[in-house]
Image (tube, helix red, strand yellow):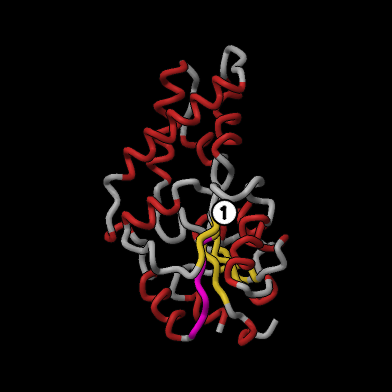
Amino acid sequence: MNKQEIKAVIFDLDGVIVSTDEFHYMGWKKIADEEGIYFDKTINNRLRGVSRMESLDIVLERAARFYSENEKLELAAKKNSYYVGFLSALSPSDILEGISDVLDALRKKGVKLAIGSSSRNSKIILEKIGLLNAFDAIADGTEIKRSKPDPEVFLLASKKLSIEPSECAVIEDALAGIDSANGAGMVSVAISDAKSYEKATYRIETAQEILSVLF
């Protein structure tokens, strides 16, 4: 693809725009402790980019007993309430380095901007950091049935933008997110934890490089 063909950039939220990983860890750790289940940060890393219920299944792998679907739903809701409580500490100062400048530069180029996230709390997070109105579209876990690596969330974002998937680029920090972007037929840009992933179209060290690799 020629660089000038990119008409939209879709950003994953957690780990790209802002990091709430520690809040997720704290929430799952609290649930695990309450249930007497071993949980650490190595296990937590397996939860990156996957849905809440899939994350819970991973947490419960070490459980000593069987959990019914209703019990799982209750635990997932309780974890989310803990997580949302932790989010109250977020502010615009938590936006990751370079992102605000990149968003401004892309906007000036006339590039459409979207969020593509498996999170069901995307709008809460964006509101806390002052970016709720910074994107032309938001596709998140409240609207999809299949989480990453399925391409559904990114395809939904491109549909909301009325831009063909082949004209979209995705910024991701998770391997599942890169696979999702590739599956959608989009340009994939790997940053942070995904920056060494060979399946990404581009691999970058800093947010500022988004502009140089795409345009």
Is residue 172 a member of the stretch shown in magenta? no
Residue numbers of the magenta segment: 110-115
Quarter holding the C terminus is bottom right
What x and y, as percent, mark residue 68? 61, 18
In the visual, does 187 lie left or right of 63? right
Number of numbered discs: 1
Q: Compared to 166, does 152 lie above or below?
A: above
Residue named by callout 1 = 174
Q: Mainly helix, strand or loop, the magenta region? A: strand
Quarter holding the N terminus is bottom right
Residue lying farthest top?
65
What x and y, as percent, mark residue 178? 63, 59
Instruction: Tell me the kind of residue under disc 1.
Output: Ala
What x and y, as percent, mark residue 101? 37, 75
Q: Compared to 18, does 80 lie above or below?
A: above
Which residue is rendered at x = 58% and y = 71% of the image? 161
State whether residue 197 appears in this view. Answer: no
Q: Compared to 187, does 37 lie above or below?
A: above
